Image: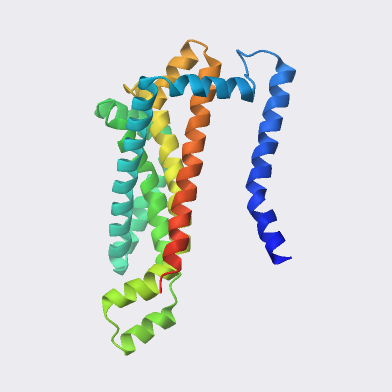
């Protein structure tokens, strides 16, 4: 029975996805106007049309590159500030600063950075700044979740720092850390695309979406959106998979 339960549990996302596609199909058929809402089949056809365009692959590659760069920068800064926050005074200062950053409207950040930076740089900067407080909170929560008893045992037996990191810190932090960063990367990608659309960044998914909206090419807009969703889901799945593997480390 346990095997059946595992299979059923694994199939839940598939059934949810099929249910959403069915709702989409019903809504499109009821509306009956491709310009307003194309059917899933029409959207998939548009996807295949995009796959044959070199400009689409260039846009996808550059959007992903901006997303990865912004995410890595935010991840590094969040880890640095989280480690420094182990000093009580620094922790209070960092907590206040990140609370302020979280309170700033995202649209304000986007619009200001579009004024200050070039269209090619602004989207990555927007994403890095907006997700930084989120990743910082993820690191702080993961660090606080480590068993203090194990840390004290390591101190008593003078366990080397390398062993502590590999055998205590990483396994304990893996699940919350990778869960948080997986969601953070999806948010990061959405922010990148939104900023690209506003900035009309050349060779980007955001600019392609904006142009499709201007020319009322709803099918193409839906196709690009579908690609972005698939990329986001695959990225989250990959990050969570890596987290599970790290948790199994001896």
Q: How many marks?
A: 0
Indicate whether 121 appears above or below 150.
above
Image location of residue 90, percent across then percent down: 28, 63
Q: Is residue 29 visible?
A: yes
Instruction: Tell me: 222 left or right of 74.
Output: right
Residue 22 in the image, given as x and y percentages of width and height: 71, 31
Quarter where residue 84 is shown: bottom left
Residue 159, percent from left and from top:
30, 83
Residue at x 44% of width, y 77% of height: 147
Q: Where is 61 relative to 128, above or below?
A: above
Residue nearer the viewer, 23 or 90: 23
From the viewer's perspective, is residue 42 above or below residue 142?
above
Q: Residue at x 66, y 49 (%)?
A: 11
Where residue 19 sits in the image (x, y, percent)? Answer: 70, 37
Q: Quadrant of residue 207?
A: top left
Q: Quadrant of residue 92?
A: bottom left
- The reply to whether residue 209 is visible in this rendering is no
Question: Farthest residue toward the bottom?
Answer: 156
- Front one among 60 and 93: 60
Tell me the residue at 66%/12% (across/down).
33
The residue drawn where x is 52% and y is 13% is: 217
| Quadrant containing the C terminus in the rendered view | bottom left
- Colour scheme employed for the rendering of this structure: rainbow
**Quadrant holding the N terminus:** bottom right
């Amino acid at each position: 029975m346990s095997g059946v339960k595992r299979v059923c549990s694994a199939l839940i996302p598939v059934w949810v996805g099929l249910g959403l596609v069915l709702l989409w199909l019903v809504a499109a058929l009821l509306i009956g106007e491709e310009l307003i809402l194309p059917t899933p089949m029409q959207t998939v056809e548009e996807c295949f049309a995009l796959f044959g365009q070199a400009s689409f692959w260039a846009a996808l590659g550059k959007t992903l590159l901006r997303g990865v760069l912004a995410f890595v920068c935010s991840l590094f800064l969040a880890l640095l500030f989280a480690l420094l926050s182990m000093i009580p005074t620094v922790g209070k200062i960092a907590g206040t600063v990140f609370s302020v950053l979280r309170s700033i409207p995202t649209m304000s950040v986007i619009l200001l950075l579009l004024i200050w930076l070039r269209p090619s740089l602004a989207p990555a900067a927007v994403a890095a700044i907006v997700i930084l407080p989120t990743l910082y909170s993820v690191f702080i929560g993961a660090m606080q979740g480590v068993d203090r008893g194990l840390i004290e045992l390591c101190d008593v037996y003078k366990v080397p720092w390398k062993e502590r990191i590999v055998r205590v810190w990483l396994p304990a932090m893996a699940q919350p850390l990778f869960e948080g960063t997986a969601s953070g990367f999806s948010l990061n990608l959405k922010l990148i695309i939104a900023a690209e659309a506003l900035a009309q960044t050349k060779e980007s998914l955001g600019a392609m979406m904006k142009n499709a909206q201007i020319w009322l090419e709803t099918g193409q807009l839906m196709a690009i959106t579908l690609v972005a969703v698939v990329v986001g889901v695959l990225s989250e799945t990959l990050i969570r998979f890596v987290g599970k593997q790290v948790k199994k480390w001896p």
